[in-house]
Image (tube, grey):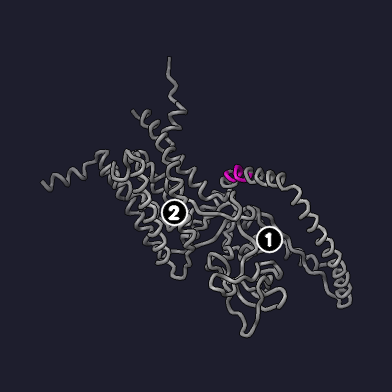
Amino acid sequence: MIDNPFNFKKLFITSTPLTTTILFIIIDAVPFYLFGDFSVKTQLSFIIAYLWICLNPESIRPIFLLILGLLIDILNNFLFGFTTFFLSLVLFIQKKDNTFLNSLDIKITFVKFSFFIIFVNIFSSIFEKLSEIDLIFNIKDFFIINLVSLLAFPFLFLIVRYYNKQLKIYVE
Amino acid sequence: MRKRSLSRFLKPTQLNYEFVERFLVLLISVVFIIVNFSKKEEQRYLRNHVVDFFSPINIIFQIPGNQINNLKDWTNNMVNLKEINLELENKLLHANNALSEFYQLKVENEELRSLLNLQIPQTINKVVSRIILDPSDIHSSRVFIDVGSDENIQINSPVFNENGLLGRVIDVKKKSSEVLLLIDSKSSVPVMTDTTKIKFFVEGNMENLSIKHLPENSIIYENELVISTDVSGYFKKGIIVGKVVKDKTYNYAVLPSAKKTDSVYVMTVNYEDQKKILLENYND
C-alpha cells in the first residue's frame, strides 16, 4: 500500500502564514463601504504578519516577508520597504528572544502591540511628511486607524494562535 | 577566538543562511526606503502596474462585499418602504416639472441653432466603472477604477457618481486607472457658484474643499451649489461639486456632494468616442 504523498490539509495548514497574510492584504485594499459614509483604512495585513512573526518566528521565511511587505506597501499606499523594514525588525527581535513581544498573558502582548502600532503609524507619517512637505494629514483618521487596529488585534490574535497550534502539530 | 567566531558566522549552516537572508531583507527594505525619497514617480508607476495586473483578482474579492451591500440596501428599502415611496413621489413630481421645462428649452435651443446654422454638439459617452482598490489613508485620497486605456479613458477625465464629481483620472493603465479624489491635498479644481456665477478654485484638505483664488469683493452664500467649469479644458461644465458651507474656523469651504462611499460604481467620460462622433458629424 502506497501512501498518498499529497495531503491537502497539511498543505493548507503549512501555508496559512502566507495565505492568511495575502487574504488580509486583499481585504485591506478592496473597497467595501459597508458602513455608509464611514470608511477607514485598515491595517489587518500588517497586524496578521506581525502576529505570525510574534507567535512563530519560523513561520514566514524572510524572503517571503520581503515580498509580502512590498505587496502591503504597494496596495496600501505605504512607502516601499516600510512594512518589510518593521516586520524584519520584529523578526530580529523575536528570533533573539521569542518572549519579547509575545507573552503568555494576552493583555501584555496587546499592550506591547499597542505601543508598536502607534509608533509605526507615527513613524510612517513622519516619513511621508519628509518625502512630501506639502502633505496634509487627517488627524481624526489617524486616531481611527489606530483604534480600529487595536480593536481588530484580539480577533486576529485568536485566528493566528489557532492556526499556529495546528501548524506546530503538523511540524512536530 | 575572534577568528573562530567569524568562521562560525560564515559557516554555511541552515542557521547562518537564515540569518544572512534576514539581514539581506532588512538591508533591501532600508535601500527601498532611501530610494523612495528620490524616485517617487517610479514608485507610483510600479504601484499602478501591479494594481493593473491584479485588477481581475480584486473584482472577484469585491463580490462578497457587493452582496452584503445589496442585502443591506434591500433590508433598508423593506423597512423604510413608505418613506422611500413618498420621497420618490416627490422627486418624480419635481423631475417631471424640470423635464417639461427642459423640453421647452430644448425646442428653443434647437430653433436658435437652426437659425444660427450650428451643428449639434457631441454627446458625452459615459463609461460606468467600479472602484476596485482603495489605498486612501490619512494623507492621500485616491482610488483605482477598473477601466483604462482599453476603454479609451484618458488622463484628467472626470470621475463622478449620481451625487456629483468625485475626482479626476491621474494615471491610465490597460485595465485600470488611478483617480485623485477631490479631497486629496493635491487636488485643485476650477469651479463656479451656480447662482452668483463666481469662479474660483477648490483644493482638497482631506476633510472638505478649501476655497482658493476667490475674486476680491465677491460674495458667496452658504448652501450655494458649486459646479465644475471647463476653464482648465478637462472638466465638463456643470457637474455638481458640492455646496458652500462654513468650516470649524467659520471660513467658507465647499462640502463635496459625492463621496467614494456612496457606491463602488462610478462614471467617467470616454473622450475617444466623443472624437469619433465629432468626426462623423464633420464628415456628414
Check disc 2 and give the amino acid type. Answer: Asn
Q: Is residue B17 visible?
A: no
Left or right of residue A121, residue B236 in this image: right
Closer to the camera in the image, B4 or A27: A27
Q: Main secondary structure of the magenta part?
A: helix
- In the rendered view of the protein, which quadrant contains the C terminus of chain B? bottom right
In this rendering, which labeled residue sits more in front, label 1 or label 2?
A: 2
Residue at 53% across, 73% down: B249
Check disc 1 and give the amino acid type. Answer: Asn
Closer to the camera in the image, A61 or B282: A61
Where are the magenta residues, as a range? Answer: B61-66
CA–CA distance between discs 1 and 2?
Answer: 31 Å
Neighbourhood count class around disc 2 (C-alpha, 10 Å): few under 14, some 14–19, many 20 upward: some
Percent across and percent down for residue B131 are 60, 53
Report the residue marked by disc 1. Answer: B163
Percent across and percent down for residue B39 are 43, 64
Report the residue marked by disc 2. Answer: A146
Residue at 64% across, 71% down: B244
**Chain hosting mark 2:** A
